[in-house]
Amino acid sequence: MPITAKPAPGAKLLTPTDHTLVMIDFQSQMAFATHSIEAVTLRNNAALVAHAAAGFGASTILTTVAEKSFSGPMFDEIKAAFPGQAMLDRTSMNTWEDAAVIKRVNEIGKSRIVLCGLWTGVCIVGPALSALDQGFEVYVIADACGDVSAEAHDRAMDRMVQAGAQPMTSLQYLLELQRDWARTDTYEMTTGIAKKFGGAYGLGIIYAQSMFGAHEG
């Protein structure tokens, strides 16, 4: 029986309204020992994710661990995307074991969870495996996570993927939420985020727009 193609998105693709983004422990103390990714790249990718979520209105939870006593404040780039939003501070390494976080997850009520943060092998593996165990669909933004070594990060990603989590990247997250350049109401926001945080892709947009007045779509 032949399969008929349709001009429609796949069910596994994210939309701005179908998931909760949880950004975990993007704090100075956690970043000091992160060696699987350069600190500048990590901060840039985390900022891209935060501004994408804020711009598209995706439900977002910001959580820290021992903010006042040990780990320090969340990165300014993330806080700037969500001015005034409270940080849910925890004692548990596994975010999914914190009652305040889970209360917020249930209030939002989305069955898809997108995770990123530090460290991959502890602070991301914990909630990923826990959420999967409870029937949630889990996505992990791999290049907005980091660990004490590349080995630690890679094995953590392997473990989550083998359990059913779906890996993605920060730029992929932004572009998946936009997905169609004909969506003119979010075009300038999306390309603006890409120009500021999107690395070489962002530079390419700046060049094309400046030199030729080019416009995607």
Image (cartoon, rainbow, N blue to C red):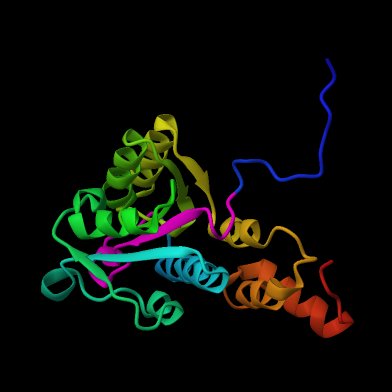
Q: Is residue 25 left or right of residue 2?
A: left
Q: Residue furthest top?
A: 1
For the point 39% across and 83% down, the residue is 83
Q: On screen, 18 above or below 79?
A: above
For the point 52% across and 53% down, the residue is 18
Is residue 25 on the magenta stretch? yes
> Of residues 27 and 35, which is closer to you in this image?
27
Q: Is residue 97 left or right of residue 115?
A: left
Whole-percent x, y for residue 94 in the image: 22, 49
Q: Evaluate whether residue 146 shows in this view.
A: yes
Is residue 206 on the magenta stretch? no
Quarter of the image for residue 178 reads bottom right
Q: Residue furthest right?
A: 212
Q: Evaluate whether residue 203 shows in this view.
A: no
> Of residues 20 and 115, which is closer to you in this image?
20
Whole-percent x, y for residue 168 in the image: 54, 49
> Of residues 34 and 75, which is closer to you in this image?
75
For the point 75% across and 67% down, the residue is 183
Quarter of the image for residue 88 reads bottom left
Quarter of the image for residue 206 reads bottom right
Q: On screen, 65 above or below 186?
A: above
Q: Is residue 113 left or right of residue 62?
A: right
Task: For the N terminus, give its image quadrant.
Answer: top right
Q: Which residues are magenta?
A: 14-36
Whole-percent x, y for residue 52 in the image: 55, 68
> Of residues 102 and 198, which is closer to you in this image?
102
Q: How many marks?
A: 0
